């Protein structure tokens, strides 16, 4: 029998790479998983595609306009508060300046430093994938 995921929350994340570094954001002090690092994004609203959600969330959270590119990864993670499907896309900044509207901090991080950050558990598979991409790109 297939287990139904009634309480599954779909969440998007942006993997934005520029000049050999990836943009990561630190969750706010009053958030669940306070001060953990993540790839910015957010929850899908009814009727949204993941791509539309990601453009909206990055504009709301970081004041950036992005173009969504290809799928980076999609993973499931079960927190005490419920299960999420985290859908990460590569994206490019096409306008705006970073303004922290909901995060505590945001940084551009290279492949050598990425594992030094305390990421949310759901973001760890993305960290692994992105580390490989950054390392590969640095060798080219």
Image (cartoon, rainbow, N blue to C red):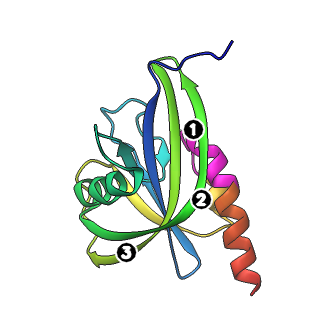
Q: Secondary structure at mark 1?
A: helix
Q: Which residues are magenta?
A: 117-128
Location of residue 111 in the rendering, given as x and y in whole percent from the top left corner: 66, 67
Q: CA distance from mark 1 to mark 3?
A: 24 Å
The image quadrant of residue 119 is top right
State yes or no: discs 3 and 2 in contact (Cβ < 8 Å): no
Q: Secondary structure at mark 2?
A: strand
State yes or no: discs 1 and 2 in contact (Cβ < 8 Å): no
The image quadrant of residue 139 is bottom right
Asked if the magenta segment contains residue 125, the reply would be yes
Question: Which residue ends up furthest to the bottom in the rendered image?
Answer: 140
Q: CA distance from mark 3 to mark 2?
A: 16 Å
Mark 2, Cα crowd under 10 Å, few <14 / some 14-19 / many 20+, is: some
Q: CA distance from mark 1 to mark 2?
A: 14 Å
Location of residue 86 in the rendering, given as x and y in whole percent from the top left corner: 52, 42
Residue placed most toward the observer, 48 or 94? 48
Relative to 134, say whether 75 is above or below. Answer: above
Q: Earlier in the sequence, mark 1 or mark 3?
A: 3
Q: Which residue is mark 1?
A: 122
Asked if the magenta segment contains residue 89, the reply would be no
Q: Earlier in the sequence, mark 3 or mark 2?
A: 2
Q: Nearer the viewer, mark 3 or mark 2?
A: 2
What is the magenta segment's predominant secondary structure?
helix
Question: Which residue ends up furthest to the top in the rendered image?
Answer: 1
Q: Which residue is mark 3?
A: 93
Q: Which residue is mark 2?
A: 72
What is the quadrant of the C terminus in the image?
bottom right
């Amino acid at each position: 029998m297939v287990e139904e995921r009634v309480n599954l929350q779909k969440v998007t994340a942006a993997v934005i790479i520029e000049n050999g570094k990836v943009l990561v954001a630190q969750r706010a002090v009053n958030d669940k998983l306070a001060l953990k690092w993540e790839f910015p994004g957010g929850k899908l609203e009814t009727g949204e595609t993941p791509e539309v959600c990601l453009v909206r969330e990055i504009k709301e959270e970081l004041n950036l306009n992005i173009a969504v590119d290809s799928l980076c990864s999609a993973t499931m993670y079960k927190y005490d508060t419920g299960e999420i499907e985290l859908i990460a896309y590569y994206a490019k900044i096409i306008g705006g300046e970073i303004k922290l509207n909901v995060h505590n901090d945001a940084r551009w991080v290279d492949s050598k430093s990425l594992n030094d950050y305390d990421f949310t558990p759901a973001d760890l598979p993305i960290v692994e994938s992105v580390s490989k991409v950054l390392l590969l790109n640095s060798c080219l």
